[in-house]
Image (cartoon, rainbow, N blue to C red):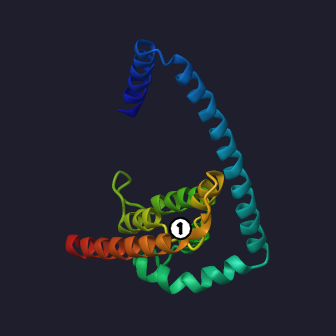
Amino acid sequence: MLNILWPIFIILSFIYALISGKVNEVNNGIFESLTDAVELSITFLGTMCLWTGIMEIAKQTNLINKMTHLLKPLINFLFPDLKRNESAKQEISMNMIANILGLGNAATPLGIKAMKTMQKENAKKDTLTNSMMMFIVINTASIQLIPTNVIAIRTSLNSQNATGIILPVWIATIIAAIVGIAFTKFLIKKVK
């Protein structure tokens, strides 16, 4: 649907610019936006490289294994169907750790890998398992200690307090996670 709406909006804005005589302003806006997009992309690239590097260092120092071990009781509570699937629990833990550290881009491939691992044991290949649904909810809520992408965007836009978003993000993501997990657990029990 968006692939239809965006071209329509672009065409309408050019027609309006021609009618109102503001073609130069549209051209200037396009080039300013391109410059901003490139600067933002470079900022994101730097942020991603930094945190992906930190994540790799954490892997090599066994910090990830320790964090995974700390998450084990929570993983067992959230995903009781995965008692025997240590591989899926490890991948889910890695995904959650990446999200907690604000590494959404690093968390995505880990999440896809975890879903593929859970799908291997799924008896109904066209239906999500309870564990898969819970995993989607947790990823959507995505509790973050360091919202790196938001901080990067705010920094690129010359925010006076780029890290001022941290406390509201903590509150919003924790509440979203609690409500999402509780509702999902409720629905899972109701369906059984």
Residue at (60, 68) in percent of width and height: 163
Position of residue 109 in the picture relative to residue 58 (left or right): left
Residue at (35, 51) in percent of width and height: 126
Q: Nearer the viewer, residue 176 or 125?
A: 176
Quarter of image, res 129: bottom left
Q: Percent x, y for residue 41?
A: 66, 45
Quarter of image, res 50: bottom right
Residue at (74, 56) in percent of width and height: 49
The three-letter amino acid code for the residue at tag 1 is: Ile
Q: Quadrant of the C terminus?
A: bottom left
For residue 178, say whether it is visible.
yes
Q: Quadrant of the N terminus?
A: top left
Residue at (40, 73) in percent of width and height: 177
- Classed neighbour count for the residue bearing mark 1: other residues with Cα under 10 Å, few (<14), some (14–19), many (≥20): some
Q: Percent x, y for residue 140?
A: 43, 62
Pointer 1: what residue? 165
Q: Nearer the viewer, residue 117 or 69?
A: 69
Question: In this picture, is 153 found above or below 87?
Answer: above
